[in-house]
């Protein structure tokens, strides 16, 4: 389930000139930002619900959200909710944050410190804690998250529709989301050479026996993380050895350099003496 929360200090909309004049943002994303900042402070809104308030399609909406994430106006956080399911939360800010990096955490509720390392501004507007979505809304929100994640990997709209067109069970959608998180880890470690083809094959071959698949996914995640940590450790060891070798070579060259300097200095003194210069 993707939830959008807006953080602002006023009930009326004041648009920063930097947003209005940002040449990296399309007019579509600027309009979305204006709409989000105009929302009231008494409810959350999902990406799927947001689609109902615009003539733009879901793809266009996701593109606009991605633009705002890139420019720091929206922070995206994925975490496990109290039921152990993945949930995505988009936090909207009036002014761009220093860094908005996607992250994955496992607390019952998201940390009140955003990923830029800055504490939340005063008056967080959307803080409804008792909003329960119907099964249909949950499925729609999870589908929306999956669509966005797969698009970021590089799949086309047709490829995504073909993969999930017959999946309407929320548990199965969450299993797919778990698998996508694993795929992203493998892509980041360089394990996957063709992300699109690998993603399609992996999702098509998912066994939806939930306990077994979740255990397998978690085991694969741990394996990939261990591989990544091992590779990073080996890289650090290699870098340290190279540094030590360079240092040893430098120390070995110092006596030779001193000898050359002494020889040139001696020759210079002799030349000075020969032409009658000062000693």
Image: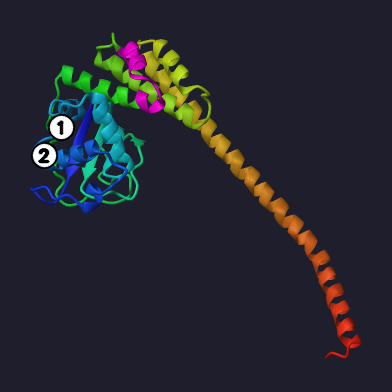
Determine the main secondary structure of the stretch shown in magenta: helix
Pointer 1 with pointer 2, Cβ within 8 A: yes
Looking at the image, the residue that sits furthest to the top is 166
Question: Relative to residue 107, is residue 45 drawn left or right?
Answer: left
Image spot of residue 81 (x, y percent): 25, 30
Q: Quadrant of residue 110?
A: top left
* Percent position of residue 92, x then y: 22, 42
Q: Residue at x 24, y 50 (%)?
A: 95
Residue farthest along the right direction in this orientation: 274
Which residue is located at x 47 percent, y 28 percent?
187
In the image, taking residue 77 as reference, residue 180 lies left or right, namely right
User: Which residue is nearer to you in this view: 221 or 266?
Assistant: 266
- Say above or below: 269 vs 20: below
- Residue 16 lies, with reference to residue 188, above or below; the image says below
How far across and how far down the image is residue 87, in percent? 26, 29
Q: Residue at x 36, y 41 (%)?
A: 101
Question: Which numbered disc flags the more N-terminal residue, 1 or 2?
Answer: 2
Residue of label 2: 39
Q: Is residue 162 one of those drawn in magenta?
A: yes
Q: Indicate the colouring scheme.
A: rainbow
Secondary structure beneath disc 1?
strand
The span shown in magenta is: 150-164
Give percent across and percent down for residue 195. 46, 23
In the image, residue 157 lies in the stretch drawn in magenta = yes
Instruction: Classify the position of the N terminus by image quarter.
Output: top left
Q: Residues within 10 Å of mark 1 (few under 14, many from 20)?
A: some
Identify the disc placed on residue 45.
1
Q: Nearer the viewer, residue 162 or 9?
A: 162
Q: Residue drawn 85% across and 79% down?
A: 268
């Amino acid at each position: 389930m993707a939830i959008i929360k807006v953080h602002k200090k006023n009930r009326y909309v004041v648009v920063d000139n930097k947003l209005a004049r940002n040449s990296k943002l399309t007019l579509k994303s600027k309009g979305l930002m204006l709409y989000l900042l105009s929302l009231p402070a008494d409810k959350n809104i999902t990406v799927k619900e947001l689609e109902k308030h615009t003539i733009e399609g879901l793809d266009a909406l996701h593109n606009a959200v991605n633009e705002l994430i890139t420019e720091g106006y929206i922070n995206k956080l994925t975490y496990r909710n109290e039921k152990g399911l993945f949930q995505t939360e988009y936090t909207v800010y009036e002014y761009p944050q220093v860094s908005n990096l996607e992250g994955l955490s496992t607390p019952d509720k998201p940390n009140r410190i955003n990923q830029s390392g800055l504490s939340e501004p005063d008056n967080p507007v959307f803080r409804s804690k008792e909003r329960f979505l119907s099964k249909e809304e949950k499925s729609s929100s999870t589908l929306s998250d999956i669509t966005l994640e797969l698009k970021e990997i590089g799949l086309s709209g047709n490829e995504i529709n073909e993969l999930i067109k017959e999946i309407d069970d929320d548990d199965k959608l969450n299993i797919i989301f778990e698998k996508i998180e694993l795929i992203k880890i493998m892509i980041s470690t360089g394990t996957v050479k063709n992300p699109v083809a690998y993603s399609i094959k992996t999702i098509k071959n998912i066994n939806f026996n939930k306990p077994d698949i979740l255990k397998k996914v978690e085991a694969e995640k741990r394996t990939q993380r261990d591989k990544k940590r091992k590779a990073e450790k080996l890289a650090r060891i290699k870098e340290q050895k190279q540094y030590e070798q360079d240092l040893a070579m430098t120390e070995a060259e110092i006596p030779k350099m001193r000898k050359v300097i002494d020889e040139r200095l001696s020759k210079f003194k002799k030349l000075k003496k020969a032409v009658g210069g000062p000693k």
